[in-house]
Amino acid sequence: MKKTFLISLFVLATFSMLDAQELNCTVTINSEQIQLNGQMGAAGQIYVEIKNVMQEFMNGRRWSNDNFSQEEKINCSLTIILTKASNQGDYEANCRFQVLRPVYGTTYETVLLNYIDRNFNFKYVTGTPLNYNDNSFSDNLTSLMAYYAYIALAVDYDSFGKMGGTQFVQKAFNVSNLAQWIGGTDVRNRYWLAENLMNQQLQPLREGFYSYYRLAMDTYANNPEEGRKQIMTYLETIRQVNQVRPGTLLVRIFFDGKSEELVNIFTDANPTDRKKAATLLASLDPNHSDAYRRLGK
């Protein structure tokens, strides 16, 4: 009897671990700017509530049909800087969304996405339940969180299988359309991120995520020379895409999260490869050209 009971507990625990939700998302809310502007309002407890509600929404829902064990969860973070608040619960904010991925056989986590959202505006009144449906628009807060949940899954799946995150890219694009986030002239906004991931013309960039992460980063510790070769091939792909669509958002986001990592990777290359990488990187990512120039010396 006792043995049967223990086996049942083990089966239930195993099922629970396999049925775990996909995300391990940390939400941070910074209200310092509001306080400086004298907009603190009804005490800072509301910000703690918003943080907890958002974190539970991201981590407590199932976003796919796949089963994730605890160690397979996708590590990501939403860092929200509030800039304005009203007594009616309207908030204006900037947000940084970052997605991380462990590198096989190491303790190192590489950045899959490092994205700044300068229009993270939403409404929240204390005690309000968050209702979300993929097929309809409810409110901006739930749409924002669903959008970033799907973006996190998209880039993670793309890193493990070529174009593996396509279903989640489509879902993020659908959220954007239902919320009526328009493209406009701000080429770094959420609409353009989803559009870039959907765009057939930019497909080589997404296909290259697999080469960069699975074929290069996951094998780098055992074969750094082959890893650097794979990365140089991907950089050449970026150069070719740039010729067709210069200044595309996906390229900017890639280098925003990768410049330091790329310098570290090519620092140990032979002098010829190091200089070649430095020249190519400086041309593709002029915002970090100083770091790349040091690499070429």
Image: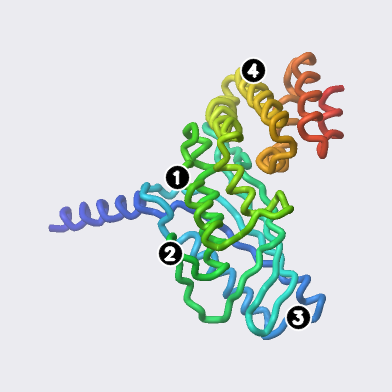
**How far is mark 3 from mark 4, CA to CA?**
55 Å
Q: Are marks 3 and 4 in contact (CB under 8 Å)?
A: no
**How far is mark 2 from mark 1, CA to CA?**
16 Å
Residue at image mark 3? 39
Marked residue nearer the N-terminal end (2 or 1): 2
10 Å crowding of disc 2: few (<14), some (14-19), many (20+): few
Please tell me whether mark 4 sits on a helix, a strand or a loop.
Answer: helix
**Which of the two discs, 3 and 4, sits closer to the camera?**
3
Q: Amino acid at mark 3?
A: Gln
Marked residue nearer the N-terminal end (1 or 3): 3
**How far is mark 1 from mark 3, CA to CA?**
41 Å
Across and down, in percent, residue 220 comes to 60, 25
**How far is mark 3 from mark 2, CA to CA?**
33 Å
Residue at position x 67%, y 30% from top?
Answer: 241
Marked residue nearer the N-terminal end (3 or 4): 3
Q: Amino acid at mark 1?
A: Gln
Please tell me whether mark 1 sits on a helix, a strand or a loop.
Answer: helix
Q: Which numbered dot is residue 225?
A: 4
Q: Which numbered dot is residue 167?
A: 1
Across and down, in percent, residue 35 comes to 77, 77
The image quadrant that residue 155 belongs to is top right
Residue at image mark 2? 133
Across and down, in percent, residue 137 comes to 49, 66
**How far is mark 1 from mark 4, CA to CA?**
34 Å
Q: As rendered, which of 51 and 204 lies closer to the eye? A: 204
Residue at position x 53%, y 30% from top?
Answer: 214
Whether residue 168 is visible: yes
